[in-house]
Image: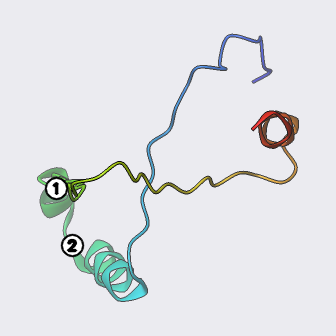
């Protein structure tokens, strides 16, 4: 599918989990029945601790091959 220029606002949520937790999920997927997989519901909660003060910490994860990422870094 080619880029028609309308996908710039699409955001794909992602998260990182530990290798141990990932291995548990993979093992379950290998052994679960079709009925069990059809009942699977994934729920996640993102908890952001609130701290008093005016300090904000953040991380930027960018792809080095992306021109948009390089433009962002230069402008930032």
Asked which quadrant contains residue 10, the reply is top right
36, above or below 45, in the image: below
- Left or right of 54 in this view: 75: right
Q: Is residue 64 left or right of residue 57?
A: right
User: SS class of the residue under badge 2?
Assistant: loop
- Mark 1 secondary-structure assignment: loop
Residue depicted at 37% across the width and 85% down the height: 23
In this picture, residue 9 sits left or right of residue 12: right
Q: Does 76 appear above or below 40?
A: above
Q: Nearer the viewer, residue 33 or 71?
A: 71
Residue placed farthest to the front in the image? 53
**Along the line of sight, the residue nearer the viewer: 53 or 38:** 53
Disc 2 marks which residue?
Answer: 32
User: In the rendered picture of this protein, how many numbered marks are placed on residues?
Assistant: 2
Between 39 and 57, which is closer to the camera in this rendering? 57
- Please name whichever residue, 13 or 4, is drawn nearer the observer in this view of the structure: 13
Where's residue 1, x and y in %?
Answer: 75, 24
Q: Which residue is mark 1?
A: 40
């Amino acid at each position: 599918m080619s880029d028609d220029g309308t996908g710039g606002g699409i955001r794909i949520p992602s998260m990182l989990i530990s290798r141990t937790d990932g291995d548990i999920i993979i093992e379950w997927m290998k052994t679960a029945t079709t009925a069990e997989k059809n009942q699977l519901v994934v729920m996640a909660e993102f908890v952001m601790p609130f701290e008093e003060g005016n300090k904000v910490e953040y991380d930027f994860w960018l792809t080095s091959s992306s021109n948009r990422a390089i433009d962002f870094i230069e402008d930032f």
